[in-house]
Image (cartoon, helix red, strand yellow):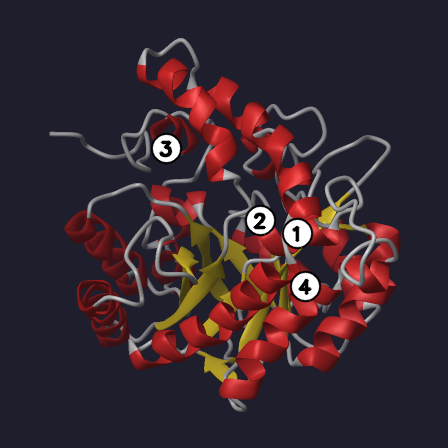
Amino acid sequence: MYETLNSPVNYGGITLKNRVIFAPTSMGLGAEAWREALRRIAAGGCAMIIVGDVPVTRHGFGPSLYTAKGRAFYRSVADAVHQEGCLLCAQLHQTDSDWKAMLKYVPGVLTKRISPQQLRPLLNEQVGPYITGLPQKKIRAITEAFGEAAVLARQAGFDMVQVHGDRMCGSFSSALYNHRTDEYGGSPENRARFAVEVVRSIRRRLPDMPIDYKLAVRQEDPHYGNAGVLAQELPVFVPLLEQAGVTSFHVTLANHGSLSDTIPPANHPYFAGQGCFLFFCDQVRGLTRLPVCGVGGLNDPDFIEQQLRAGRIDCAAMSRQLIADPDWPNKVFSGKTGEIHRCVRCNKKCLGGMMAHQGVHCIYERMD
């Protein structure tokens, strides 16, 4: 019944055993719990897991590729996932937060006068000035760090890397944040330069490494997303990224707004439907022959099969559904769809757990 969903695919140079990918997710868990959660998702039958927010510099948050301890952790994750017949991708990430500008908010956060929900827009206000004023020497150091981190990721056992096209790449891409007057600002071609140099840095060091790109698209009318690329700018960005060495595109809504937009609940005023971001994939599909992965509220196997058969997407990425039920792929492929714990997109324990600094969980979990 789900022949396309359960069929292998060449995804930018690697063969996935089926079309299900675990989308990059900031899990907020301790090392052992995080590793076990990913192993469990791998055992459930998905083809590839994308580890979210792997820092490309030595001082980012999370396990560092530059330390023996960090590399050992990622190697242990790779070994655990590979043993379950699943591939592993590192989402290479560089923050666009201005840490010096953040210092003034620390007292308010510590005294709980500023909540995590209130802190987010305050930090977003600092992104534009930070990106606009970043020295070119610092820019070059960061773009080179993506290449260095990719080499370390391969050594740690990752099968693919994904460039996080939101965050710093997305902020350079966005005319809302990037007000530079040098070769990194102004025209869409110039605003694409940072991301292009990031991809080239990886490709120069690793000529055969598959490079996925999280292509963050923002829209107007209505306005959603502040970083990323306007839909009408995609004809500039997509070819430039492909020429630089990208081998596949993971297409989604741009961030730097409300997290409930990029992780939309079932009652979202605009993104409530199944496959809520796939219309962005339609626009990208017309610009490239590279594989395109869609994401956004996907949990219905019949709907996903239809999109795959129609050629609308090549792979389906999901996060909340595989957190709700890691066995979703195995249940679908064995004809046990009636046993699936379907994500209801309530965001209570997943997004809610992350915002409360309790880690990503699900209402289906039995919390002992």
Mark 2, secondary structure of its residue: helix
Mark 4 or 3: in front is 4
Dot 1, crowdedness within 10 Å: few (<14), some or many (≥20)?
A: many
Callout 4 touching callout 1 (CB < 8 Å): no
The x, y position of residue 314, in whole percent, is 63, 69
Regarding residue 277, the answer to whether it shows in the image is no
- Distance between mark 1 and mark 3 Cα atoms: 22 Å
Residue 191 sits above or below residue 290 on the image: above
Mark 4 or 1: in front is 4
Dot 4, crowdedness within 10 Å: few (<14), some or many (≥20)?
A: many
Regarding residue 137, the answer to whether it shows in the image is yes
Q: Which residue has dot 1 on it?
A: 170
Is residue 124 left or right of 99 when viewed as pictured? Answer: right
Residue 175 sits above or below residue 222 on the image: below
Q: Which residue has dot 2 on it?
A: 167
Front residue of 34/197: it is 197
Q: Earlier in the sequence, mark 1 or mark 3?
A: 1
Write down the quadrant of residue 236 in the picture: bottom right
Mark 4, secondary structure of its residue: helix
Amino acid marked by disc 3: Met
Amino acid marked by disc 4: Phe
Q: Quadrant of the C terminus?
A: top left
Callout 2 touching callout 1 (CB < 8 Å): yes
Front residue of 101/333: it is 101
